[in-house]
Image: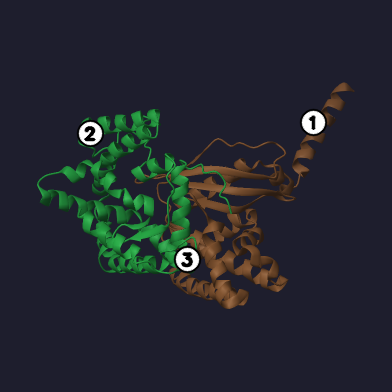
Amino acid sequence: MKAAPVFALAAALALSGCASTNPSDPLETYNRAAFGFNDALDRVALKPAAEAYQTLPDFMRQGVYNFFSNLEDVGNGLNNVLQGKFRAGASDFGRFALNTTFGVGGLFDLATGAGLDKHYEDFGQTLAYWGVESGPYVVLPFFGPSTLRDAAVKPVDFKTDPWLYVKPVRTRNIGTVVRVIDGRAALLDASNLLEDAALDRYQFVRDAYLQRRRSQVYDGDPPPAEQ
Amino acid sequence: MKTFKYLLAVLGLFIGFAAQPAAAQSAAEAPDVLIKRISQQVLDIAKNDPQIQAGNYRRIMDVVEEHILPHVDFERMTALAVGRYWREATPEQQKRLTEEFRNLLVYTYSGAISQVKDQRVEFRPFRAAPDDTEVEVRSRVLQARGEPIQLNYRLEKKADGWKIYDVNVLGAWLVDSYRNTFASEIGKNGIDGLIGTLSERNKRLAASAAKTAQP
């Protein structure tokens, strides 16, 4: 995953500063452009690929999902520990150990059935837990909605992702493509709903994403927002 | 004599139960019990009805109409989404806004129901004082792949039972997700502009929904 040039691009575009009327979205002009770019990319490549992928047998897609989901538990565990959530962290590391060994390299998720819950955490959430503000909303090319804080530390999440250490690079790249398509396939239904529900998709996605992100930071239980 | 009295009492009790109107029963139903009942009903219907599985919107909307709509306070939901402009709207505009927003949500929600496959709903412990008139019921939809979908409901106690007035999907409240869009639409084209935009969208959705009802 060639992250560095993407971030350089995002940063350059973001810093080129665009006057926006909305105080909650100072980068709106740039963001809308990035949103449009992602949308176009999705329409011509990602969505068609995901739709084709959906025709694969269920057990195969389940295996792909489980495999990459298992690798994410390393980062989940680390970030839980960094936030002092030791019980959750232990559960995530336990999941990784169990699924990697008895779950045949993560193809099967035995841990959930064994009562080891998964706790989604990333480094952006850890920073938020430490008190770092999110900063403005940023749409990253290729990666989608984010905030300045989360975008800046995305490389940290890549560092804790075992897949990105796989050699040879060719295998790593093929795996990454499959992973991205699998992730998109999971969102097919949701993105079709969004087409119906949103009057202005950019705005709807932004407002829903920022709320969701805040909710994630508080593990689903955010204090009431100040109006 | 004693036996007779006893019999009479039992009979009275029986009649008392039978005569209790259905509305009173649902008014007495606790909000979490209500949400659990509706969720289970709708999931069961969606999983077992081949027409719904095939994506027949007409059929899905009948189910939504019958099982969900009676428990939703669309007027309050719309008023919250429209925000400060609500009081500037005439009663007629308020009525139209509520109607169009309601239809938009029904179409969207119906789309979600047609996608029900192997999901299960799990409820989080319900906390509320007996005299609360505003509560939140929290649930999660569990699926084979992916993060559980958080699904919370805000309800208000009304004379005819608890009514849902906001829904939280994946951490985002529905009303909050619409508020900015509505405000900017009203800012540009006024309240009638928003009514027009909503109604156009609904016409388009109705047209594509009509196609699914063809045999």
Specify the subunit that label 2 lies on.
Answer: A
Q: For the point 45% across and 62% down, which residue is it? A: A25
The residue singled out by tag 3 in the image is: A198
Mark 1 vs mark 3, CA separation in Å: 57 Å
Specify the subunit that label 3 lies on.
Answer: A
Chain A rendering hue: green
Place of residue A144 in the rendered image (x, y in percent of width and height, measured from the top left): 34, 59
Residue B104, located in which quarter of the rendered image?
Answer: bottom right
Q: Amino acid at mark 3?
A: Ala
Q: For the point 11% across and 49% down, which residue is it? A: A169
Q: Residues within 10 Å of mark 3 (few under 14, many from 20)?
A: some
Q: Is residue B89 above or below residue A89?
A: below
Q: Which mark is residue B126?
A: none
Q: For the point 15% across and 49% down, which residue is it? A: A172
Q: Which chain identifier belongs to the brown chain? A: B
Asked if one can make out residue A113 in the rendered structure from this viewpoint, the answer is: no
Q: Is residue B43 left or right of residue A53?
A: right
Q: In this view of the protein, which residue sits in the foreground, A71 or A185?
A: A71
From this viewpoint, which residue is outermost toward the right?
Answer: B1
Q: Is residue B130 left or right of residue B115?
A: right
Looking at the figure, which quarter contains the C terminus of chain A? bottom right
Q: Secondary structure at mark 2?
A: helix
Q: Is residue B184 above or below residue B44?
A: below
The residue singled out by tag 2 in the image is: A100
Q: Which mark is residue B10?
A: 1
Query: Which mark is in front, 2 or 1?
Result: 2
Total numbered circles: 3
